[in-house]
Image (tube, rainbow, N blue to C red):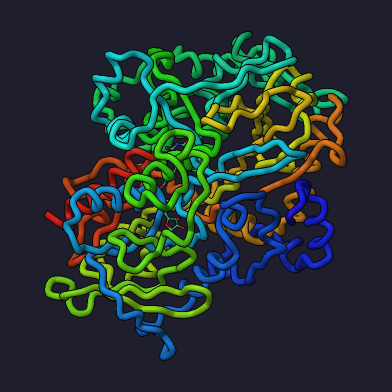
Amino acid sequence: MSGRITRRDFAQATLLGTGAVLLDMQAPIAFADEVVQARVGPDWYGYGGVGDYAASHGNTPDLVNAAHSIRDDQQADDPADTIDTGEEYDLVIVGAGMAGLGAAYEYSKRAQSGSRCLIIDNHPVFGGESKRNEFDVDGDWLIGPQGANGFSVPNTREDRESYKDIPDLRYMRELGVPLDFDYGVPQQANGRIRLARDNYGYQYWQEEITSVAHYFRGTGPQGNWVLDPIVNAYRDLPGSEASSRDLFRWRAHEFETPSALDDERWLDTMTYKQFLEDELELAPEVTRWADRIVTGSAGFGCDVISAYGAMRLGLPVRGERREYDSWTRHSFPGGNDGFSRYFVKKFMPRAIRGTDDFDGIMNGGIDFAALDQPGEAMRMRLGATVNRVRHDGPPETAGHVIVSYIQNGTHHRLKAKRVVMACGGWINKYVVHDLPDQHRTAYESFVHAPFLVANVAVRNWRFVERLGTGACMWSDGEFGNSCNIRLPMHTGSYRPQIHPDRPALLTFYVPFYYPGEPAAAQGIAGRWELFSTSYAEFERRIQLQMNELFAATGFDWQSDVAGIVLNRWGHAYMTPQPGFFFSRNSQPTAAEIVARPFGRIAIAHSELEGIQHWGPAADRGKRAIEALFS
Ligand SMILES: Cc1cc2nc3c(=O)[nH]c(=O)nc-3n(C[C@H](O)[C@H](O)[C@H](O)COP(=O)(O)OP(=O)(O)OC[C@H]3O[C@@H](n4cnc5c(N)ncnc54)[C@H](O)[C@@H]3O)c2cc1C
């Protein structure tokens, strides 16, 4: 594993050991969550790249196994051999994703001398879905995102001032994150190619300013590519003239705005599919096209998401065009890992080695030993899965919260004066033993979608460049529906060359959705597929997909692929269904109920926003601290 090229070694070592029982399973839509029983191991996890994040890419086997044992073990008490650490904290934060880090940062700003805070996370590295993969391909250092990808910044000084209080810009200013960035210039590539700066903006929001080639299976002997279909109003797409016309009408906002939209809450009474097909009377092909965009940003597709949620994603609901060119989309090389590193550096400066500037924070090594030091005001305990949280009496009068966790297979217990649960409903409803019934009922309307991000390190990307693009999309295939080579941001000493004959990362986005099935069943089936498929099987599917897309332009699997890292997220997104955003009958929404603190515990997670985004996620953490300490 220490060599530069490790994928093939890994595949050979694990192919034989891969449990056939996991390989051939179907994805049964009617199965209950309980079916995901099999314990997973290193052969399932696969190669992790190099550097600090190599052992923490997506859900780890330990995490998956621990989470399933929590789900299956609902006993009220800790096992007899639980170690009481004797620790007592003023605050424990469960979850070191953007919400947990936002809570920790806020607490660190108000903490008084002698106060103590512990952050506990079940991954080996902080960041939650905002982490990176790193590769060393023949000496070239490459960084890609594991999940959360990008952010946008207003272009003008006036807009930066007007929007300075929205969470993204407020945090960037407070943390010292720059607002302007440098990117490399592609060398020796087709000069017309416009590379995307992130890994999914090109699917819709950046479609007009990036090159995107769409592949259609079976429309010719080699399939069929259509480059930048938007330029010719989608007329070059296979399919009926009417569906192309509807697609362009939707994309160009050339339809009449429904009068009921005078009150935008109306949109939250229906799915986006209902809005497109019943209200706008557009062809079902438009829904299928939009599904790829919605699933990439919200998990499930148009048949699940509230039309209001689709509007929040920026998809068309009004017959007037929205301009996108006053904000610029950016992505750090590792996606939003940049923000998680900035947060940690701010409240735990020794955790990231090196200087306190852009280069140091983005590229410094993590000092794991510095994270959990006795005597420090802010501590972080990683690789620890919290399995029980409850007040030590009735929540209204209890003096403490007992927090139990499993680390390296051993059960531990400690005390906290207050707790922020900065993780999602899928785990809170099992872990928080005295969760009020109201909260528990509210969580029933939350549906969570799995997602897979695969970073494929290639020794060259000439086979993509020959298509006249850096980004590709397809509908029917073996693996995912989109992939791209992006224009990497320069972050101090990280300045990879962008040359079609040099190594690069091809990043695949892979949703799991089953249109027409009930949302909860889609989640179960998707997690089944995500968790029961071995690394070797996903590798095989990637090979089939890349051969289908790129063999004709010179792709050679054996010589071109240097490494593959899979980042599996069992509960990547909570897809907001109709009714999520606005209450009916003056009742609070489910998210409003979940966000209400009870006793000494408050819940904060990006899912409470409906559309998950880094700044509001961190702000949820801040609000939980305000509620608990006011
Ligand atoms: C593929 C993908 C692309 C995305 N792209 C973007 C984007 O471009 N821009 C953007 O702003 N956002 C994006 N997001 C959304 C992203 O989810 C949010 O921005 C944000 O990072 C989520 O932070 P969080 O803290 O709410 O949740 P998480 O990141 O999920 O953090 C929760 C943490 O709690 C841990 N945890 C859970 N249970 C326990 C337990 N029992 N014990 C201990 N720890 C536990 C989890 O493992 C995790 O580390 C994307 C998400 C995905 C999946």
Residue beneath the point at 20% across and 59% down: 597
Residue beneath the point at 30% across and 80% down: 86
Where does the N terminus fall, quadrant-wise? bottom right
Where does the C terminus fall, quadrant-wise? bottom left
In the drawing, does residue 103 fall left or right of residue 282?
A: left
In the drawing, does residue 592 fall left or right of residue 282?
A: left
Percent position (x, y) of residue 405?
Answer: 41, 73
Residue beneath the point at 58% across and 23% down: 196
Residue 93: quadrant of the picture: bottom left
Kindly tell me whether residue 319 is visible in this rendering.
no
Percent position (x, y) of residue 38?
Answer: 64, 71
Residue beneath the point at 68% across and 64% down: 42
* Name of the residue lying farthest toward the bottom: 80
Q: Is residue 292 above or below residue 497?
A: below
In the drawing, does residue 85 fall left or right of residue 33?
A: left
Residue 495: quadrant of the picture: top right
Percent position (x, y) of residue 299?
Answer: 50, 44
In the drawing, does residue 615 fall left or right of residue 531?
A: left
Q: Toward the viewer: 349 or 32?
A: 349
Residue 43: quadrant of the picture: bottom right
